[in-house]
Image (cartoon, grey):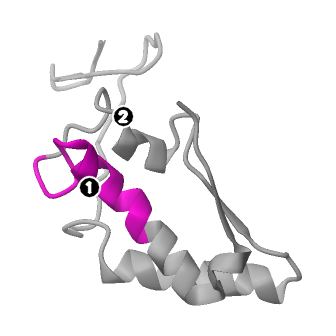
């Protein structure tokens, strides 16, 4: 734990003697909804325009999608937590958005147990 100038403590992910300072507030987006699907569609179409054969969705190594799939990191209290169906909802929505943008023949997913 690092102490800031006001005596408040911030949890650190690695040992550090320095205070973390102000915590940036994320934008108020209720969840991965229309905005995320729009960005996914644009990114996928740009990859194909750039000459890639397809898109592989990487769902491992503690990246964002993996965090939704893991019960140790997914502590949300919405439609994306709890049951395996809810935890998988995020990745399935991404797969649907990618397939819709470029087709199922250009979409792959990499999973790890």
Position of residue 50 measured from the top left corner of the image (x, y, whole percent):
85, 83
- Residue 89 figure quarter: bottom left
User: Which of 1/70 is in front?
Assistant: 70
Q: In this rendering, would 10 be left or right of 17?
A: left
Please say if 113 is above or below 93.
above
Q: In this rendering, would 85 be left or right of 66?
A: left
Report the disc number at residue 112: none
Position of residue 29 measured from the top left corner of the image (x, y, whole percent):
24, 70
- Residue 99 figure quarter: bottom right
For the view shown, which residue lies furthest in the left direction?
77
Q: Residue at x 72, y 85 (%)?
A: 46
* Residue 103 forms part of the magenta stretch: no
Packing grade of label 2 (10 A; few <14, some 14-19, many >=20) is some
Q: Residue at x 64, y 85 (%)?
A: 103
Position of residue 78 measured from the top left corner of the image (x, y, whole percent):
12, 55
Classify the position of the N terminus by image quarter: top left
Report the disc number at residue 25: 1
Please, what secondary structure does the residue beneath circle 1 have? Answer: loop
Q: Circle 2 is placed at which residue position?
A: 70
Q: Residue at x 37, y 21 (%)?
A: 12
The segment highlighted magenta reads 77-93
């Amino acid at each position: 734990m690092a102490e800031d100038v006001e005596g408040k403590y911030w949890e650190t992910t690695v040992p550090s003697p320095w205070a973390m300072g102000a915590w940036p507030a994320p934008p108020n987006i209720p969840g991965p909804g229309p905005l995320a699907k729009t960005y996914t569609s644009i990114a996928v179409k740009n990859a194909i325009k750039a000459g890639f054969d397809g898109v592989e969705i990487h769902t491992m190594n503690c990246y964002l999608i993996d965090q939704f799939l893991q019960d140790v990191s997914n502590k949300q209290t919405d439609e994306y937590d709890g049951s395996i169906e809810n935890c998988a909802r995020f990745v399935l929505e991404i797969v649907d958005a990618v397939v819709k943008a470029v087709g199922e023949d250009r979409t792959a997913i990499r999973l790890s147990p």
